[in-house]
Amino acid sequence: MKITFYIDNPDLDELVDALEVELRDWIKSSNSTAELINDRPDEMVFDRRGGWDFGLQLQTKKKTTLQKPLEFLQELAKRMKLDIAIGLRDETSGKVEDICFIAWEEPALSLDEVATYLGMSR
């Protein structure tokens, strides 16, 4: 399953350079298999994220693989006052369905909570 972690912030334009450095540095230092996603359409569509998919994508079926990115992104969200949408990418259509959120103002989600929301059993 492809799990997405997209930054959900109306000021993404102003934050994207700093966030890209943070995400690239984390991918490199953690040896994660996560990929940086920066899919900004030519013409912005004003939906929840403004049509701009920016964040991380991770291919896994193991909930333990979520631990490091979840901890990093929760810390990043608190530090930079971000909300982050966690979703699943449909393998056929490529569309992402948001499943849950990391909200910088809310208590951290546990690995078990996120895994349950995503339908992961192991």
Image (tube, rainbow, N blue to C red):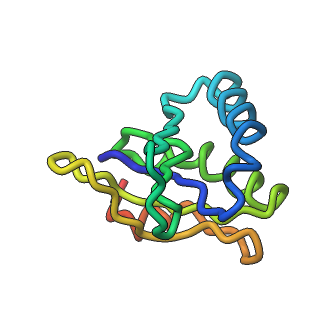
- What residue is rendered at 44% in x and 45% in y? 41
Q: Residue furthest left?
A: 92
Camera-side residue: 47 or 104?
47
Viewer-proximal residue, 108 or 3? Answer: 3
Q: Quadrant of residue 25?
A: top right
Question: Position of 36 compared to 13: left or right?
Answer: left
Q: Determine which quarter of the picture holds residue 26.
A: top right
Percent across and percent down for residue 106 are: 72, 77
Residue occupying image coordinates x 44% and y 61%: 45
Q: Is residue 68 left or right of residue 81?
A: left
Q: Position of residue 96 (x, y in %)?
A: 34, 57
Closer to the camera in the image, 37 or 118: 37
**Residue extending furthest right?**
79
In the rendered view, tell whether residue 33 sits above or below residue 60.
Answer: above
Furthest residue in direction front, as rendered:
43
Residue 34 percent across, percent down from the top left? 50, 34
Would residue 29 appear left or right of 59 to someone viewing this image?
Answer: right
Front residue of 77/37: it is 37
Question: Residue 76: x and y, percent?
Answer: 76, 52
